[in-house]
Image (cartoon, helix red, strand yellow):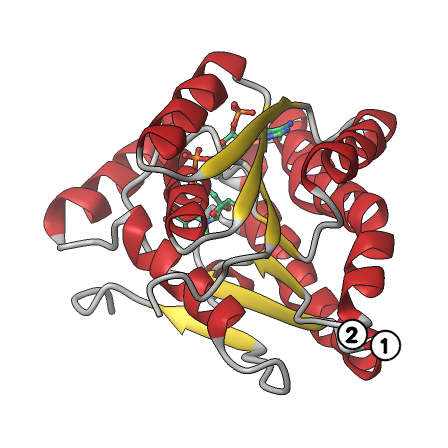
């Protein structure tokens, strides 16, 4: 059918731009009710309008996912408004690459706070709903990692460290949650054309990223959205655990 995700209740973090925004639209287009999380309320409101105009259901929940209490409050609010969450796309992240000797310690901390701490806050807040939902239907926890989790890339040290954490965390969570019927997945994209490089504070690293995006036909957010939708749409007994997605021309 055209609505394989009908009846599902999804949460997408980092939904105000890039991969998260595209995925929220895709999941809603396939019939899921979607809660969209990020800090920029104006972007979330516009996304909800777009989804509703296309006949979908979405609610905007502005939240900074590094604030554990705020994420818990968001989880309670979403359960109230949409029902028990059975799909979490744990996607908010920031990439602030720089040479280690620059000692951009504030950038190091921001990446750890969001890419590790924020991801853990989302897991803590939504896991009870996922395990409850798994008792009688599909339930998915899908974490956004990166090819940086496994590649050895200059200037990527802290970012890569956070993504290696996400990929390995995903494997470990699967061992505990698979037997409870919660599927756990990591997606590891290569270069995707989003706002991600806009936040880099190191000029050399910014040029490096811009060059990569300019020189090859990189992935678009819709390509990742399609993959997330696929992970959630396969039969309940099938868990796609780790999916690497590269632009064809990226070495
Ligand atoms: P974007 O910068 O477009 O999206 C990042 C999202 O995270 C935004 O919606 C942003 O919203 C949100 N966000 C940032 N800080 C917070 C916060 N404290 N609380 C809540 N939300 C927050 O980049 P992408 O779409 O590319 O990034 C999505 C994920 O994909 C990230 O985890 C990234 O590491 C990963 N990734 C991206 C790749 C790429 O090439 N683009 C490759 C591999 C992985 P707001 O500012 O409104 O809060």
Quadrant including the N terminus: bottom left
Q: Residue at point 52% right, 17% down?
A: 40
Mark 1 element type = helix
Q: Is residue 229 above or below residue 49?
A: below
Q: Are marks 2 and 1 in contact (CB under 8 Å)?
A: yes
Q: Secondary structure at mark 2?
A: helix
The residue to which callout 1 is attached is 176
Residue at image coords 62%, 80%: 236
In the rendered view, does 27 fall on the left or right side of 34?
left
- What x and y, as percent, mark residue 88? 64, 53
Left or right, 7 with respect to 3, comes to right
Which dot, 2 or 1, sits closer to the camera?
1
Specify the label residue 172 is tagged with.
2
Q: Nearer the viewer, residue 90 or 128?
A: 128
Towards the viewer: 127 or 235: 235
User: In this rendering, does residue 160 appear at all?
Assistant: yes
Measured in 3D between alpha carbons, the distance from the residue under mark 2 to the one under mark 1, in whole angstroms, is: 7 Å
Residue 131 is drawn in which quadrant? bottom right
User: 122 or 250: nearer the eye?
Assistant: 122
Left or right of 241 on screen, residue 56 = left
Q: Residue furthest bottom?
A: 237
Q: Position of residue 151 (x, y in %)?
A: 47, 67
């Amino acid at each position: 059918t055209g609505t394989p995700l009908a009846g599902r209740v999804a949460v997408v973090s980092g939904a105000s731009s890039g991969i998260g925004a595209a995925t929220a639209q895709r999941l809603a287009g396939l019939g899921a009710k979607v809660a969209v999380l990020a800090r920029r309320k104006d972007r979330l409101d516009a996304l909800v309008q777009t989804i509703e105009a296309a006949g979908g259901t979405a609610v905007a929940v502005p939240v900074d996912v590094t604030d554990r209490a705020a994420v818990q409050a968001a989880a309670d609010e979403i359960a109230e408004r949409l029902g028990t969450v059975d799909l979490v796309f744990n996607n908010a992240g920031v990439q602030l690459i720089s040479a280690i000797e620059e000692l951009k310690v504030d950038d190091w901390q921001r990446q750890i706070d969001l890419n590790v701490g924020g991801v853990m806050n989302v897991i803590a807040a939504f896991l009870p709903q996922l395990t409850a939902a798994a008792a009688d239907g599909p339930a998915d926890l899908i974490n956004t990692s990166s090819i940086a989790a496994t590649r050895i890339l200059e200037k990527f040290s802290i970012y890569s460290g956070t993504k290696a954490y996400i990929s390995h965390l995903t494997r470990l969570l699967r061992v505990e949650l698979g037997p409870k019927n919660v599927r756990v997945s990591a997606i590891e994209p290569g270069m995707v054309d989003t706002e991600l490089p806009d936040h880099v504070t190191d000029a050399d690293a910014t040029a490096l990223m811009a060059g990569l995006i300019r020189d090859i036909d990189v992935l678009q957010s819709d390509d990742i959205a399609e993959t997330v939708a696929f992970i959630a749409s396969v039969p309940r007994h099938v868990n796609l655990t780790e999916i690497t997605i590269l632009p064809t021309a990226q070495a």
